[in-house]
Amino acid sequence: MKRFPHFPIARNRREFLTQSANGFGALALSALLQQEAAANPTSNIQHLTSNDPLAPKPPHFAAKAKAVIYLFMVGGPSQMETFDPKPVLDKMHGQQLPKSFGEVKGQFVKQGTPLLHSHWKFKKHGQSGVEVSELFPHIASCIDDIAVLRSCYTDSAVHAPAMYQMLTSRVLAGHPSLGSWVTYGLGTESQNLPAYCVLTQPEGLPEGGAPMWGNGYLPTLYQGTQLRNGGTPILHLDPPKHSNARQQRHLLDYLRKMNEMNQGAEDSEMAARVASYELAFRMQQHAPEAVDVSKESAATKKLYGLDSPHTREFGTRCLLARRLVERGVRNVLLFSGGGPVSTQWDAHDLIKENHDKMALWTDQPIAGLLKDLKSRGMLDSTLVVWGTEFGRTPVSENGKGRDHNHEGFSMWMAGGGVKGGQAIGQTDELGFKCVSDRYHPRDINATILHLMGLDQWKLTFKHNGRDERLTDFGGNVIQPLLA
C-alpha cells in the first residue's frame, strides 16, 4: 500500500517553516524580518514582507534624483561635431593621421584615409563658458545646467553590443537594463502607470532592440513597457464591453484571493503576475489622461516644438516623458533614431546632412524638456541623460562621413544632483581616444544609481548562484559630476 506524507513536500524554506510546528516557525520568521527592517530602514528586506513587487522601497541613502529620463541617440553622434571642439583637427583637415595616435580600427574606414574637419563651429555659452557646437543652439542655451562627459568609451564598435553595454554594462544581450535595476531597487511611486516606459522612434527600433530595456533574469514585471507612437501610445486600455469597473474589481479581488491560497512567499513570478493584472486595471482609468498632451498650453507645446513639422514628433515624446515623470513614473528611455540608417545618427556618409537633420529634430525638444522641468521645479529631482553607444572617427569615410569610434565620445547629464556648467574628461587633440578620466559604461551606470540613492554593491540579485549587479564587478562613481 502506497503511503502519502501527512504534509506536502515543501518547495522552499518558507513553506517548510509554515508547515512545521503548526506554523509557529513562519510567525517567528515574520517577526525577525520586521525587526530587521525596523533596525535598518534603508534595507531592501522590507520588500520581502510586501505582496506587491512594485511597492515603493527606500533607497540605500538619500537620493538626489527621483526619476531618470534617458535620451538615447541611436547610431553614434560625432563628438567633434557636437560637444568636443577640436581646432587642431580642423587645421589638419585632409592630412594623414599621425602615427603617434595609433591605428584606426573602424568597421569600414580604410587605412590612409585623411582627417576630416568638423562641419560646425563651436562657441562658448552661458556663465560657465562651456563650448557647444552651433549644431545645438537650443541645448547650448541650457549649458549651465549640463555636465558634459567628453571621455566616454565602450568595449565594442558594433552597434548592438555597444548599446547593450551602455544600458546593461555588458556587451551580450540578456542582462537586466538600467531601468529594470532601478525599478527592482526602488519600486514605483505611480500605482497607475508602468514604472519603466520606453518611447521609440516611429520608423523602427534600434539595432539592439528590446534587450536594451529588458528585465534579463530579474522578474518580468521589471522590464520596460514600450509605448506605441501615434495617438494611442498604450493599446487595450478600454474596459471590456461585457463588464464594468465594479465587476472587474470583484474579479481581480477573487483572482488575488485564489492565487494567495497557493502562492509561496518566495513565488516572485506569481506576485508579479497578480501585480500586472492590478496595474492593467488601474491604467484603464488613468493612462489615457497621462498620455494626452492635447490639454497642454499653447506655450508649452511651442516650447517643445509641437508647432513645427520638423520637431513635432520628437517634441511630443519629450513632452510625454515629462508628463510620465510628473505622474510618478521613475524611468523613461527615449530614443532618437531607429529603423533605417536614414533616421539614425549613424553618419557613414554625408555626415553634414545627417547630423543637420537629426539635430533639427531633437535640439529644440530636448532644450524644451530641460527648461520645462526647471520651470516646474522638477529638474532638481529628475536626472536627464543624453547618451549614445559610441562616437565617430577623426578620419573620414569615403571623404564625407565618419566610421564608428568606441575609444572616445561625449555624453552629458543634467538635473538630479548633477553639477552643471562644466566639461569633464578629455580626448586627444583629434578626438580619437580618451586621454584623461576615461569613463566606461560601468562608471556611468554606477553614477546614475548613486544619484538615484542606490549603492551598486548592495543592489544585487541572485542568479545561477551568483550575486549579479548592474555594474558587474563594479564601476567608479564620477565624483566631479556630483553637485
Image (spheres, grey):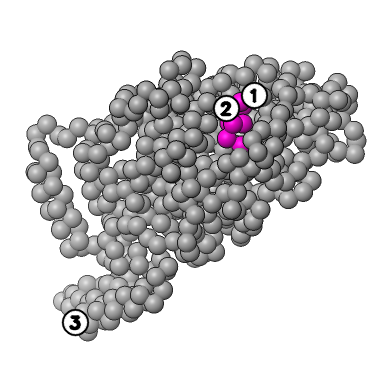
The image's mark for residue 135 is 1
Residue 340, labelled with which disc? none
Nearest to the eye among marks 1 and 3: give it: 1
Residue plotted at (27% across, 65% down): 264
The dot on residue 22 is 3
Given contact means CB atoms under 8 Å apart, are the residues at marks 1 and 3 in contact?
no
Query: Does label 1 or label 3 sit earlier along the sequence?
Result: 3
At 37% from the left and 45% from the top, the residue drawn is 329
* Amino acid at the residue labelled 2: His
Q: Which residue is mark 2?
A: 138
Q: CA distance from mark 1 to mark 3?
A: 71 Å
- Residue 367 as seen in the image, left or right of residue 144: left
In the displayed structure, does residue 224 sit left or right of residue 247? right
Q: Amino acid at mark 1?
A: Leu
Magenta stretch: residue 250 in it? no
Span of residues in magenta: 136-143
Q: Is residue 93 above or below residue 85?
A: above
Find numbered disc 1 in the image and state the secondary structure of the residue it sits on: loop
On the image, the x and y values in percent for residue 432 come to 78, 36
Circle 3 residues within 10 Å: few <14, some 14–19, many ≥20:
few
- Total tally of numbered discs in the picture: 3
Q: Given the image, on which type of amino acid does mark 3 rest?
A: Asn
Disc 1 and disc 2: Cα gap in Å?
9 Å
Q: Is residue 96 visible?
A: yes
Q: Residue at x 34, y 51 (%)?
A: 189
In which quadrant of the rendered view does residue 76 lie? top right
Which residue appears at 69% of the width and 37% of the height? 130
Q: Closer to the camera, 13 or 439?
A: 439
Q: Position of residue 174 (x, y in %)?
A: 50, 47
